[in-house]
């Protein structure tokens, strides 16, 4: 009986002792279990930082050069670019002075002055803080204040994110094509009105429609004029009498020759056609009707006569225009007139002949500007032997001009920030520093702007994201004035 009671009692005492030792170890000797706790924490932390779960922002040059890539690549020596993870982005920004250093009165390599609002508001802080959106305030260091007040510092990370690109200031000659619109017109030097210096009638009308082409010397009509018949006969009589005085004295022959010459001169004064005059000398008889020829090749613009009609001296009968050369009258914007000169080559295109162009030259620059359109007028002459260009066609014109007579400093158009009052470019000064610099601009052509003053050859200017950097510069200037005022009040 006693043995049966003693065995369970011993078991209970052993279990109680074991539990008491375990409770004491955990409550009064925590140092006995640090390895297990640290290992567990380290394991959990390691799982949270697995490379597969870390997002790569970009890749940087393994040699520390300011070169970045959104995809893996190798440098010239075959070394892989180094990935930069999202949790490492802050390493691009200069680190703030540790709290321990400040507590001990020591100073790190860069002296932290204050923190500024990340959204550009005029709010600063002497300690790290966040704005209402949870964004960290940006540290401002003493060495940044030592730079020119206009210089902006941007970390390599932000340069990569903003997509900042730079190009060199180059020395080149700008080719500026001036574009204009115009219309094809007949040359005023190739327009003639057919009329006579005598009274008569239209016996036969050979060119009887407007728009018909004619060739030089082609007969337009046959006319009857009593004055022409009489003058022809006078010439024939004078010539016959001069021929009969072959053995007469010299004075008589001279007088007869003068009569012949006078009759011939009267025919020419009446614009008697040369072809009819040769016929008269050959046939020795007066013709009742005379063939009247076209003065040059072209087309009939106007026809004012009909068969059987009577006409008077000086009355217009036909209007004829030549087709080559032909003119293009172009309207050039007032601001482009200074770049246009007589003799410049011009390229003309018309919708009637897609894919084709016609070459000509500036023949004349009219001395006035349209009061309503504010455009100047330029006349271009073009050879048109086949008559392909027709009057009143709409034409697009491109004049080949030089914007500058000599080479000039130029930058891409995107490098110039123009707010309507001033023009600024951003000069790269290295190590993430950018200097806004006012410039004086000149002509523009082919995507480049001439810089008259403000930059030097081979300086590098920002050509993308420059508006963001310019905004940063204006913000820095405003903050500088703001903090200066705060320090004065303190």
Image (cartoon, rainbow, N blue to C red):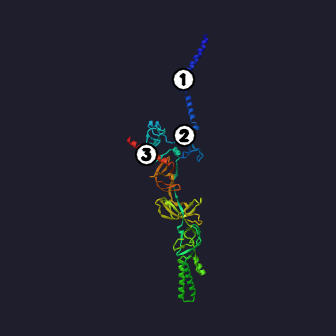
* Distance (Cα) linking label 1 and label 3: 63 Å
Coordinates of residue 206 in the picture (x, y in percent): 59, 71
**Label 1 neighbour load within 10 Å: few <14, some 14-19, many 20+:** few
**Which quadrant of the figure has residue 200?**
bottom right
Q: Disc 3 or disc 2, which is closer to the eye?
A: 3
Residue 339 in view: yes
- Determine whether the residue tagged by mark 3 lies in a helix, strand or loop: helix
Quarter of the image that includes the N terminus:
top right
Of the pair 15 and 357, the residue shown nearer to us: 357
Going from N to C along the chain, the mark reached first, 1 or 3, is 1
| CA distance for labels 2 and 1 | 43 Å
Q: Earlier in the sequence, mark 3 or mark 2?
A: 2
- In the picture of the structure, the residue carrying the numbered disc 3 is 478
**Residue 405 in sight here:** no
Position of residue 278 relative to residue 29, above or below, is below
Give the labeled residue for mark 2: 86
**Which quarter of the rendering shows the C terminus?**
top left
| Residue that mark 1 sits on | 25
| Residue 405 horizontal/vertical position (percent) | 50, 61
Residue 105 percent location from the top left of the image: 44, 37
Residue 113 drawn at (x, y percent): 44, 41
């Amino acid at each position: 009986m006693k043995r049966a009671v003693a065995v369970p009692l011993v078991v209970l005492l052993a279990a109680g002792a074991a539990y008491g030792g375990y409770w004491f170890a955990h409550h009064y000797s925590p140092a006995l279990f640090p390895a297990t706790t640290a290992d567990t924490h380290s394991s959990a932390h390691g799982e949270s930082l697995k490379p597969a779960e870390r997002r790569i922002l970009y890749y940087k040059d393994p040699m520390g050069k300011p070169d970045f890539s959104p995809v893996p690549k190798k440098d010239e020596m075959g070394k892989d670019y180094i990935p930069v993870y999202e949790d490492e982005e802050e390493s691009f920004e200069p680190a703030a002075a540790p709290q321990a250093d400040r507590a001990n009165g020591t100073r790190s390599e860069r002296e932290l002055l204050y923190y500024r609002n990340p959204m550009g508001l005029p709010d600063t802080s002497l300690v790290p803080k966040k704005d209402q959106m949870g964004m960290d305030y940006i540290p401002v260091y003493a060495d940044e204040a030592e730079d020119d007040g206009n210089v902006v510092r941007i970390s390599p990370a932000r340069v990569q994110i903003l997509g900042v690109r730079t190009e060199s200031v180059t020395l080149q000659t700008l080719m500026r094509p001036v574009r204009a619109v115009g219309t094809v017109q007949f040359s005023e030097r190739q327009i003639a009105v057919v009329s006579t210096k005598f009274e008569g009638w239209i016996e036969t009308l050979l060119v009887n429609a407007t728009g018909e082409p004619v060739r030089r010397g082609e007969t337009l009509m046959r006319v009857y004029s009593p004055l022409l018949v009489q003058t022809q006969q006078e010439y024939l009589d004078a010539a016959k009498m001069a021929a009969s005085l072959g053995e007469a004295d010299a004075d008589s022959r001279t007088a007869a020759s003068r009569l012949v010459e006078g009759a011939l001169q009267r025919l020419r004064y009446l614009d008697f056609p040369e072809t009819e005059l040769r016929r008269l000398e050959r046939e020795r008889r007066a013709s009742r009707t005379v063939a009247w020829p076209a003065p040059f090749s072209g087309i009939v613009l106007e026809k004012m006569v009909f068969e059987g009609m009577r006409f008077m001296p000086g009355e217009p009968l036909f209007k004829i225009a030549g087709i080559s050369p032909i003119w293009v009258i172009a309207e050039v914007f007032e601001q482009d007139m200074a770049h246009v000169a007589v003799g410049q080559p011009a390229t003309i295109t018309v919708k009637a002949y897609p894919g084709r162009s016609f070459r000509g030259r500036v023949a004349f620059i009219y001395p006035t500007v349209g009061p309503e359109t504010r455009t100047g007028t330029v006349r271009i002459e073009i050879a048109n032997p086949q008559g392909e260009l027709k009057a009143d066609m709409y034409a697009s014109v491109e004049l080949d001009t030089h914007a500058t007579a000599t080479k000039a400093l130029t930058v891409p158009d995107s490098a110039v920030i123009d707010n309507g009052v001033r023009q600024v470019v951003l000069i790269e000064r290295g190590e993430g520093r950018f200097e806004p610099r006012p410039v004086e601009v000149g002509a523009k052509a082919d995507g480049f702007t001439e810089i008259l003053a403000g930059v030097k050859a081979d300086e590098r200017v920002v050509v993308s994201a420059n508006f963001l950097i310019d905004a940063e510069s204006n913000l820095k200037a405003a903050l500088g004035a703001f903090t200066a005022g705060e320090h004065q009040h303190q």
